[in-house]
Amino acid sequence: MLEGGPTGGDVLRRAIGGQRRHVAGASLLGTAHQGCEAMVPVVIGIVIDRAVATGDSGALVRWLVVLAGLFLVLSTCYRVGARMGERAGEQAAHRLRLELGTRVLDPRGGADADRLPGVLATIATSDAKRVGGVATVLPYGVAALAGLAVSAVVLLRMSVPLGLLVLLGIPPLLWLGHRISRPLERRSGVEQEHAAQASGIATDLVAGLRVLKGFGAESAAVARYRRTSQDSLGAALRAAGSRAWHDGAILALTGIFIALIGLVGAHLAMNGDISVGELVAAVGLAQFLLGPFQLLTYVNGEFAQGRASAERIASVLAAPAAVPTGTAAPAAPVAGALRLRGVRHGALRGLDLDIASGSLVGVVARDQAAAADLLVCLAREAAPEEGSIELDGVDLAELDPAAVRGAILVAHHDADLFEGSVLDNVLAGRDGDAAGAGPALEAAAADDVARTLPEGLETVLSERGRSLSGGQRQRVALARALAADAPVLVVHDPTTAVDTVTESKIASRLRDVRAGRTTILVTTSPALLAVTDRVVVLDGGTVTAEGRHPDLAAAHAAYRSVVLT
């Protein structure tokens, strides 16, 4: 985990502490509400003893006015306090979502390890909402305890036995409630885990729907999701059963306790120890106590679920970084010379490679896993297990990961487009206009794509650019990579879905648009490899051959088998 990473308890405390003012205000208003509500049966008992029993109409009017004032205060406090509590919960959840977003986008990476995108989305939505809900319900818990305290004090003034019964009975009930909530907490965490997994698989299936249809694999995909969904449903039903058992058990315990208070009060009234009005007040307070106990039950259940969700959030926030945290910045300007020594990572087995500044180099890998691992290391998505990678003579481990990605841009084969205009996708948030992006658009033959669209560069694409064909998406993605004008650009198979004529255009223009900057083409395209200064062949995770494309094609049988067949 990240050093000093938060635990589930830390997440809960920060969520509540960040909304301290609103939680305190809601708690104060809730306390006033519960206190006034507890006084209602007391005032009714006074009305009976001082007005009804004596026939004093003046006293009846005075105490009815007091009763009306109590209802006015308690209703106002409830409305305002509930609004403040909801605000605290929503703001706490929002802050957690921001923290999660910051961690997921951290240049060091690691938050998405072994987690599907849908899982992260569920944690940032459902789990954050549950933890934020703890800030919402905490004032209810404080108010409920205040109501119990007021009731105990009033009952003590009426009768010491009644008051002691409440004071001594509440702590064991609260302890039992906490113990009963343990299974709910465990099952809530499992429920959220299964729900997140189902969401992650659904996201993947929707994203790859076209591919699945192309392979005729819809039935297998549906069966996979059905199994995951059924597991999620089972976990949800077990959590719901646990919640029902929890609420039922607490309700039964509180019902027995309240009945006991009523029986003791009735016995005291029969013996003349308390008046009829005090008996009515005692019975009313016993019925009132059901409200605070139900609130405590609800709060306890929300805390149990919130703790489970807080642990899941903490697991993301404290996820170990994928790469070391360097602090240095690359030399300015970045020349773009790369040096790999003894790099071992995944399929790479002690790779040694030198790439001169400003050169255009092709990399051909017989094993695509080796190509993927090379891209991951150059992009600083992971640190090599062994060996070093240097940029202009400085080890990448010593550089800030964000600065490395500003100097070395890795354009993956499966790069996604975004919902927005073609120009917005090419500029990718940078300042600029169509004229500035023109060279990149032309080099990637994406200007041809724009001319076929109804509004040219201003045409708005659908989600992930699905309104374009595969080849059109590739060209726009390549234009985006070229428009970034990074000192070092690593491109992986940018023309696999492009026709041969367009591929030749791209190959002929690529050298000019990247003149003076380092470019690495990880590809098996003969057209692209033909324009490179040098081609490096990877086999078994190491360099087995290098040279010009025509020379390798003529003398290297393994090279021909990969590139020309």
Image: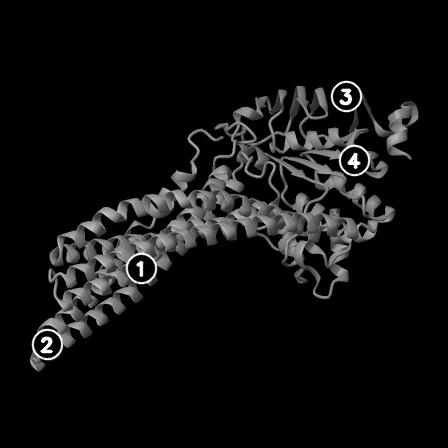
Q: Residue 150's x, y, as percent? A: 19, 56
Determine contact: label 1, label 4, CB under 8 Å: no
Q: For marks 3 and 1, give the CA distance.
A: 76 Å
Q: Amino acid at mark 4?
A: Thr
Residue sitting nearer the eye, 229 or 494: 229
Query: Considering the image in quadrants, where does the C terminus appear?
Result: top right
Is residue 321 something that shows in the picture? yes
Residue depicted at x 24% and y 57% = 261
Give the mark nearest the N terminus, 3 or 2: 2
Q: Secondary structure at mark 3?
A: strand
Q: Residue 15's x, y, as percent? A: 38, 46
Residue designated by label 3: 543
Residue depicted at x 57% and y 51% = 429
Tag shown at residue 523: 4
Residue designated by label 1: 290
Tag shown at residue 425: none
Q: Amino acid at mark 1?
A: Leu
Residue depicted at x 83% and y 49% = 215
Give the mark nearest the N terminus, 4 or 2: 2
Residue designated by label 2: 51
Q: For marks 2 and 1, give the CA distance.
A: 28 Å
Q: Secondary structure at mark 4?
A: loop
Q: Amino acid at mark 2?
A: Ala
Going by the image, does 155 lie left or right of 386?
left
Going by the image, does 231 lie left or right of 557?
left
